[in-house]
Amino acid sequence: MRPSILFPLFAETRTLGGVGPKLEKLIARVAGPRIVDLIFDLPIGLIDRSYRPRLVDAEEGRIATVTVTVLDHVAPRDRRQPYRIRCSDDTSRIELIYFHAHADYLNRTLPVGSTRVVSGKIERYKDKLQMPHPDHVLASDELGEMPLHEPVYALTEGLPAKPLLKAVRAAVAKVPALPEWDDLAFVKAKGWKPFDVALRATHAPTNERDLALDTAERSRLAYDELLANQLALLLIRRQMRGAKKGRSLKGDGSLKALAVAALPFALTDAQLRVIGEIEADMASPQRMLRLLQGDVGAGKTIIAFLALLGAVESGTQGALMAPTDILSRQHMAALEPFAKAAGIRMALLTGRERSGRDQTLAALARGDIHILVGTHALFSEDVAFADLGLAVVDEQHRFGVHQRMQLQGKGGRPADVLVMTATPIPRTLALTVYGDMDVSRLTGRPPGRKPIDTRTLSVERLDEVIEHLRKAIARGARAYWVCPLVEESEKIDLAAAEERAAMLKRSLGSKVGLVHGRMKGPERDAAMAKFKSGETSILVATTVIEVGVDVPEATIMVVEHAERFGLAQLHQLRGRVGRGQGKSSCLLLYQGPLGETAKARLKTMRDTDDGFVIAEQDLRLRGAGELLGTRQSGMPLFRLADLAAHSDLLAVARDDAQLVLQRDPELQSARGEALRTLLYLFGRDEAVRYLRAG
């Protein structure tokens, strides 16, 4: 149960004074529905009202606090015109400007002849000083009530800054003094204050420096969040490995030898190393929970297949799960010849397999199917294995921890789990997202894979690109044309793709195909099949081709509006070419002028094709929150920690969490109890449930 000391923080924001239903909805949009969400919503800027000039010295564009006498009110004849209040000090004059004004209210607040302190942005219009809509208007004896330094928070449409600021202050006031969960010697060495003191200081910056990520206060908060993350992952890992004891899956190598003999290429040293790591893990009595990270086209699928054959050799079954229909079918088509060479039976199961589904399920339950390939359909209630030994999950970031746990329980006895991703993940991120797993990294490119010539071109040179395609198609080349990405709008994505396909057809003839996310499965398969067979030479697509699509004959990738894509996504798209014998190129079309981040992204794409280098750069440019796509990627989005800035603290948090669980496995000491509070504070309730005494 959540400790009672935290109850006030987990109340809804509507329990705060001044927060009604409308404001509650708007606050939920920027921060979240509970008070704890508000306290973790840190300032992004600062308004400094300490600049107090005479009017004659007031600098344009600055926030200033000035003391003035009200001279007169000039009401507009037309409601569309502003209401002006003329004021002065003994050096100059200024006009306070109000649009859509209420004259009664302004006459009460700023009566003619009164002295007032006003604070807001100084502007100049036709050589006159102005202050549109002052933020504060006070009588001179109320000056103490005006905050000289005001934190600025991220807003959303319809949410005014003042009510949000008031709500955050009320939320922060509810934070109690909490038991110290960090190592006392470490806290002392760092010169850190207690959690509640650090949090209050972070919400009360007095200069720009206070907003920096490396202040003692911000570092303390970041460390606490990272420690909660690492502790939770270790507890989940312990549960997944220890709750049901694993078993040793040790094959004799006979099936693998037959499959390897049928391969048209030799395995690389990197592939052999990773296969060795996986086999050793499967042979141990502990359950395997391993992440296989490999760049686009590094040869992960064949490694997964050899691991699945190891499971079959040891008398169990294997499952290979992919996130999309296209990818499942592709895995099936690519691996079936090697399955035949090894003399084993594979089957496919996706949401679209209606006919023959019952027979497949019956054969699976009897153990006649050795390896089942499929999509989310493998999670269905009616899917039961005779004895599932190894589950392989492709494109791991599309599935969460719960789905991993669900799949590995499908065979009655606990299965080993190997998850794969072609999205290279920086080391710091791998620790926070996959800390519950061992990690194998597959580096280098497979034999015969050639580098891809990457160029950036302004969209104004579109005609040249089309001419280049015309010549390439005449030589028998095939090309992808990826259309611009529009945030969260499939309709606009689709319109852009359809329009581009029509334009390319007019320019290049009928050999232009189209594939997008809103197509029905069979329709999409048909479009892909035409491109694969060469019936169409150009495939216009939205990003549905980003993951796993394999057409070795395709040698040109055109990405339109490349500046709108993240680095990881550009890298994935580029990886769709360069898979065959021909020399491949990637043309990144951009719309200028480019911002600094977009420039840096495109430069990185030109400079390197190493996915791990690209991933580290992407983390620096975009931050962890966006790195693997939006929230549905299943990644934890940190509120207080920044993985690029706080990576050194992550390593310490990892070591500390390991040490804590060695000394106090059930968190029953005084510090252990405090750490339970930390886990609840950061919403890691699930991890606490895994403690035997929890």
Image (cartoon, helix red, strand yellow):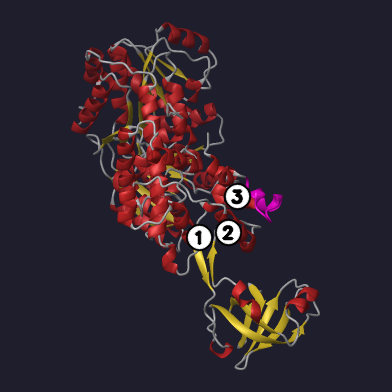
Of labels 3 and 1, earlier in sequence is: 3
Q: Is residue 110 left or right of residue 235?
A: right
Q: Which mark is residue 29?
A: 3
Q: Residue 351: x, y in percent?
A: 53, 22
Which residue carries the number 1 mark? Answer: 203
Does residue 221 appear in this view?
yes
Q: Residue at x 50, y 56 (%)?
A: 42
Disc count in the image? 3
Quarter of the image holding residue 115?
bottom right
Q: Is residue 510 magenta?
A: no
Q: Give the farthest residue toward the top.
A: 366
Amino acid at pointer 2: Arg
Q: Which mark is residue 163?
A: none
Q: Is residue 22 magenta?
A: yes
Q: Residue at x 34, y 46 (%)?
A: 183
Quarter of the image holding residue 271?
top left
Magenta residues? Answer: 12-25
Which residue carries the number 2 mark? Answer: 169
Amino acid at pointer 3: Arg
625 is higher (above) or lower (below) than 69: above
Q: Residue at x 60, y 93 (%)?
A: 91
Amino acid at pointer 1: His
Element marked by disc 2: helix
Q: CA distance from mark 2 to mark 3?
A: 18 Å
> Which circle, 2 or 3, is nearer the viewer?
2
Q: Nearer the viewer, residue 300 or 687?
A: 687
